[in-house]
Image (tube, helix red, strand yellow):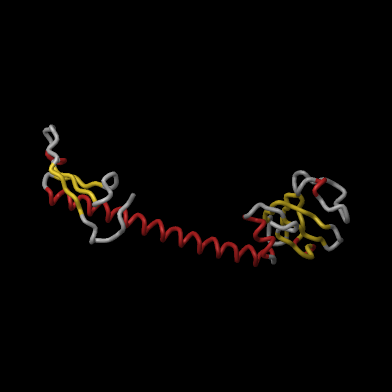
Amino acid sequence: MSPPQTNTMKIITHHICPPIPNLSHDWLAYYAGDEDGLKGWGRTEEEAIKDLENSQADIDERCKETMETARFEEELFEEMDKMRVLLVGSKALAKAIHDPFDYALKLRAGEVITFEFAEIIDRDWVRLHLKKQDEQPNKNRLPFPAPRGMDVRLSDIVWVMDAPEGS
């Protein structure tokens, strides 16, 4: 249990004096109600309190850095998603690049294909990792099972659907 980030938390101190020659742990400090949490140690009561406050400040700084990193990663992910959409021209196909699930698309020649995820090959082509042959639609089915995937020219895609059977 971590104490809330505030300077008004009550600090409890104890004069321990353990039977060791080093005096650096004579005093113990912790936040009231958090006896098992963060602790500060020192030769004096003031040193123990300062150690506790410094430890809390370190934790607060690490939390702040972690939150900033998470925000940056989220913004980067959003930008990468926009780039994928610009590259492949479809939000559903862009999603299939980073989120394996159930997708369907129709090719210009009329074939309807179900697939689980996609990979960008270059600005004109994408590789689809198809569902099993028996899971493909019966109408306008591909003549081959394509267990290793299928490369498709982006310009030959008529439409793409996310979760064609529902989620």
> Quarter-wise, where is residue 97 in the image?
bottom right
Residue projecting furthest to the front: 33
Expressed as whole percent of the image width and height from the top left, the position of residue 151 reads 76, 53
Of the pair 110 and 134, the residue shown nearer to us: 134
Residue located at (13% from left, 51% from top): 46
Left or right: 139, with 135 as reference point: right
> Quarter-wise, where is residue 9 in the image?
bottom left
Of the pair 19 and 108, the residue shown nearer to us: 19
Quadrant (top left, top right, bottom left, bottom right) of the C terminus: bottom right
Residue located at (15% from left, 45% from top): 14
Expressed as whole percent of the image width and height from the top left, the position of residue 81 reads 60, 63
Of the pair 5 and 82, the residue shown nearer to us: 5
Left or right: 84, with 8 as reference point: right
Expressed as whole percent of the image width and height from the top left, the position of residue 18 reads 14, 35
Expressed as whole percent of the image width and height from the top left, the position of residue 136 reads 81, 50
Residue located at (77% from left, 54% from top): 114
Residue 83 lies, with reference to residue 43, above or below; the image says below
> Quarter-wise, where is residue 109 in the image?
bottom right
Q: How many marks?
A: 0
Left or right: 161, with 4 as reference point: right
